[in-house]
Image: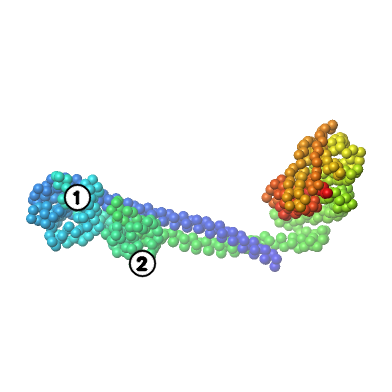
Amino acid sequence: MKKSRLSRRITWRVIGIMMFFNVLIIGAILAFVYVISLGNSTMRGQYVTDGISHNIEIMLQMVKTAAFNNRVSVEASMDSPEHLFETLEQILQVNKRLAGCFVAFEPDFFKGQRWFEAYAYYADSTRIEHQQIGSPRHNYFNGVWYQKGLSVERDGDGYLTNMYYDDTVNSGMFFSYVIPIFDRQGRKVGVYGTDLNVKWIDKVIREAMESVKMEFLDDNESIDDLDKIYFSVQVIDGRGKRVTGTDSLDLSLLKAEQEEVFGKLEMKNLKGTPYYINSRRLGNTGWTLAVLQHQDTVFAWGDVLALAILLVMAVGCVVIFFFTRRSIRRAMKPLGFLSESAQEVAKGNFDAPLPTFKHNDEVAQLRNSFGSMQQSLKQYVEELKVSTAAKASIESEMNVAHNIQMSMIPKTFPAFPDRKDLELYASLTPAKAVGGDLYDFFIHDNKLYFCIGDVSGKGVPASLVMAVSRTLFRNISAHTDKPSHIVETMNENICEGNDLCMFVTLFVGVLDLQTGRLRYCNAGHGEPYILSADSSFSTLHSSPLPVNSNLPIGVVPDMKYPEQETMLAPGMTIFLYTDGLTEAENGNRNLFGMQRIEDVITAHKGSPQELIETMTAAVHQFVGDTEQSDDLTMLSFRIRE
């Protein structure tokens, strides 16, 4: 049963991994196919759009050019209607693509004729006729084309009208290009314009559609079938009105403000089928040319390929699953035998026999490794018994060493309960079982002898140097009250036989409790703080005690350490500490630092014991759960009345 579960799990995992990568690969292939399909359709649509828009823009430019080039001839022939008609007919003979041209004058330009609009046009493909079409019925003065054309300056661009239906002479859909005309005195006297029939745009569209016919249609299908099913080409004017195109659409979806070039639009009047659109503005006409391609055409061969790939993948997965599951189950049988032997070993039977295998494969190597592990376990268990006993002995000895070290420093407080002129408190928290920080104090001949120090390094070596330093301080202080002599003598003793180059930062002070005279000597230790207050402790002042830095003891023999002194008044408090306070780190490796020490001291108004306990709480809050990295030692005392 266990073998079956494992083989099944491995089989499904292998199949899952294969399926995952198959899906990624097939997805990438299909995405590539669809991207190529869309790219081809985009290029096809752009090709048709470019071709149609290019031809339309050429025709529009021809209309504008014809208007501007012939304005001078028109203005030169305004002396009589006959001369004017002759000029218009000559313009049409030269520009055969024009449907007509006209000149409309201001009221009574020709005496006795309020409306006069000369119009020449092609009656058929070869015959040109002309008429005067101005009349009360054809009151062109109110026409937008006339007013717009009259408002243009001579050097300005003319006015291109929207498409309109004209039944004045030849019925049909036209648009016109209009510019103003001027008399010899430079006054605007009317407008001159050229007409184009919309039918030539239909011709341009059909020519472009012929280029894509063979890609979609059979030989027996016509272009009309193409625009109904696959393609639609529309020209929309600035008002959203259809100028011309291959079929009728919901034009509100194709207004000129539509800026998405390849956006998917829902053509509801085309059975809700989405089309991809290429669009382009036609020059400065305000018209938009849109080419629509059926989505089924864009992705037709991609859909077929996707279906074929999915079918092949499904069949392949079934076949792979069958053979993979069978192969994995056969390969897993030796592991079942090895599992039974492993259970015996797990029960503590390290001499349990292991199965043998014919093939020297990974399973056989696992069996050999398991055999080696049996022997290693037997040896390890024996060694573990020995090492556990040794570790327990070491831990016991370290606890004894810790108790001995802590017993060497004063830890009974109040330290001098029978004295009313002094209040003192100190604490030492080692980072390990034993540490290298020290402090000591005692009173002799009405003088307070005190010291605080920090041995380089941590652990047992530092604790031994700490014990020696504390013993030296006690012995030397018993014979002298000069801090400099105490420090120099300790330095000489520490330097002797100091093969490990251990050193101690040390601050030693002697306070005359009757006079308040404090003499002190510093050996590389941090400067203490002095706190002074008024009688009610409502106002506090703190400042560092000026000290010479000097070298730590144990570095240079025969080193001279200068002595300093100051006077302490009643109410003053001294605060001493080791670098375990300033260099306490939190989880972000930020240091507690001098500023936080000063903040706690400045806010303090209690006893030395309360000061040290407040400082300890501030450090613990700052470091949080971070492991203590260095010994933390503080000593403080206050002079009282």
Q: Work out whether 408 lies above or below 370.
A: above
Depicted 519 relative to depicted 246: above or below:
above
From the viewer's side, name the closer residue of 376 and 440.
440
Q: Residue at x 70, y 51 (%)?
A: 586
Number of other residues with Cα within 10 Å of mark 2, as a class: few under 14, some 14 to 19, many 20 or more: few
Q: CA distance from mark 2 to mark 1?
A: 44 Å
Which label sits on residue 78?
none
Q: Position of residue 477 (x, y in %)?
A: 89, 40
Q: Is residue 463 visible?
A: no
Eyeballing the image, is 593 above or below 218?
A: above
Categorize mark 1 by other alpha carbons within 10 Å: few (<14), some (14-19), many (20+): many
Q: Quadrant of the N terminus?
A: bottom right
| Kind of residue indicated by mark 2 | Lys
Count of marks placed on residues: 2
> Mark 2 or mark 1, which has the lower sequence index?
1
Inspect this view and state whether residue 599 appears.
Answer: yes
Q: Amino acid type of disc 1?
A: Pro
Q: Are marks 2 and 1 in contact (CB under 8 Å)?
A: no
Residue 278, image x and y in percent? 36, 56
Q: Position of residue 360 (x, y in %)?
A: 71, 53
Nearest to viewer (mark 2 / mark 1): 1
- Residue, disc 2: 268
Quarter assignment of residue 502:
top right
- Secondary structure under the numbered disc 2 in the rendered image: helix
Q: Is residue 200 above or below residue 322?
A: above
Judged left or right of residue 415, residue 212 is: left
121 vs 164, nearest the viewer: 164
Q: Residue furthest front?
A: 535
Residue 180 is labelled as 1
Residue at image coords 20%, 52%: 150
Q: Secondary structure at mark 1?
A: strand
